Amino acid sequence: MASSIKSTALDTTAGSATRLLSLDALRGGTIALMVWVNHTFHPNLFDNPTLDAVHRQWFHIPWNEPAQGVTAADIVFPLFLFAAGASVPLSMKFGRGRDRKWWRTLLIALKRGVVLYMLGVLLTVASAAYTRPLVWGDLLSWNILQLIAAAYVVCVGVFLLPRWWQVGIVSTILLAKWGVMTLVPYDSVAELGAARAAEGAPTGTATWQHYQGVKEALNAPAIWFDRLVGWTSDTLFGPDEGTGDVLRDDRLGGFGWFGGFQQALPAAAIAVFGGWSSLVLVGSQGVARKLLLVLGGGVALVLLALLLSGGYDASGTGWVGRFTVPSSKWFFSVPYCLLSAGIGMIVLSPLWWICDVKRWTTLFLLRVFGLNAIALYLGSEMLFKCIIARWSIHTPAGDTANLASGLIAWTERWTTSRVVGSLAWPVIYMTLWWLVLFWMDRRKLYLKV
C-alpha cells in the first residue's frame, strides 16, 4: 500500500489544479544524477587528459584550498533544492495548501521538516553505527536531507509573505553571506586559523584561512553551549574526537546546528528562486514571455555569479577586487548560490517547453525518478551504506573487496576494459532502481515526506 507519509515539499499533489510535468522531470533527472555521482568511483578513467577532464565533472571539487570552483557534481544537490522550492508555492496556491491558514501551513511545514531531518540523521548514522556506538549528538548532525529540511521550512515561511518581503529576505540572506566573507577583518579570525595550523589541520592560503576562520567564528555559540553543559557534553554528544575543542566538533561546529544554518539560509534562497520560477511558468503570460523571463533570469544569475567570482585569486583579489569570492560548495558562497539557481532556471525552461507546452513524452521517463525521489534517495543510500559497502566478495586478484568494488573488478576482467568495468556499475545500479520505481509507479506507490 502507499505510504501514509505525504508531502508537498518535494512534489505537487496529484489533485492540484496546476502541475508542472517539467518539474517532475527536473527532479527525476537531478536525483538520477545524484545517484550517478555517488556511484562513480574512478576520476582518472580514460588515461586521456581531455576525456578525464570531462569525466571529473562527476566528482566533487575538494572542499578546501587550493581547489575552489564547482563541477557538475557540485551543482546536483542545489538543483534538488531548486526543484524542492519550485513545488512550494504551487502547493500553497493551487494544491492542498491553498485553503489553509498561514499558521497551519507553517506548522505542517515544520512537521515535514522534522521528518526529513530525522530521515537524514538515519542516513548519516547508517554506516557510522558499524564502527562506533550511537550517541545523542548524532541528532545534531547535518547532511543532505537535514539541509533540505531546514531550507524547505524557511522557503515555506518566505512564501507566506508578500512578494517584496520575499525579495528583501532573499537579498538580505545573500548580502549577509557575501558581507561576512568579504568585510570581516582578517585579523579578527586569524587566531582561529593559527589554532587550526597548530593542530595540524590543512590551512591553505591566507584567504582560505580567512573564510574558514569566519565560518568557525560564526559557530561560536557552540562554545557557549559547551560551557553551559560542559559536565554532560561528553555524555550527551560523545567525545570530540580527541581535539578537546568543541568548535572543531562537526556536530556542534562546521556541520552541526550552529554551523548548519550558514548553509541552510543560502540553500533556502536557492529554493525560493525555484519557487519564483514555477510561479512564472504557471502564470498568465504567453509562452514566449515565460521562457524569456525564466531563461533570461537564469542567464543573468549565472553572469552575476561569474562576475562575483571572476578572476578569483588565493591572495584575495579578482574582477571585483577584494570583494571577489570563489564559487564554493564548502562555504555555500553567494556566487555558488547564484550559479546554482541560474542553472536551475536555465534547465527548467526547456524542460517546461518540452513537457508542458509540447507534451513530448520522451523525457517523461525521468518522471519515474521524480515521482519517487525520496524513495530512490533513501533506498539507494541505505542499500549502499548497509549492504553494498559492507558485504565482501572475492576479486579476480584473489583478495576481497566490498560488493561494488568487487563487481567492478569482475566486470573489468570479463570485458577486458577498465572503462566499461567502472561505468557499468552506476548504469546497472540506476537501471535496477528505475525498474523498482517504475513498478511502484504502476501500482501508485509513492513515498512522500
Image (cartoon, helix red, strand yellow):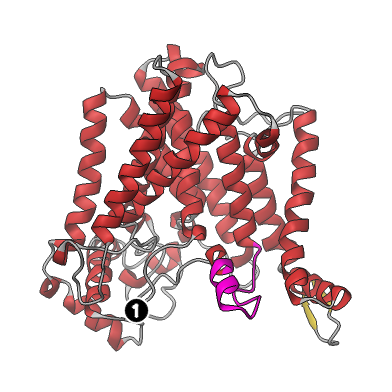
Observer-nearest of 133 and 177: 177
| Residue 382 falls inside the magenta stretch | no
Highlighted magenta segment, given as a residue range: 39-55
Q: Quadrant of residue 251?
A: bottom left
> Can the viewer see residue 136 in this picture?
yes
Q: Quadrant of residue 168?
A: top left
Q: Quadrant of the C terminus?
A: top right
Q: Position of residue 23 (x, y in %)?
A: 54, 32
Look at the picture and state if 45 lies above or below 82.
below
Q: Amino acid at mark 1?
A: Gly
Look at the picture and state if 215 lies above or below 413.
above
Identify residue for label 1. 244
Residue at 38% x, 30% y is 292
Residue at 56% x, 78% y is 49
Q: Position of residue 352 (x, y in %)?
A: 53, 30
Look at the picture and state if 406 lies above or below 159.
below
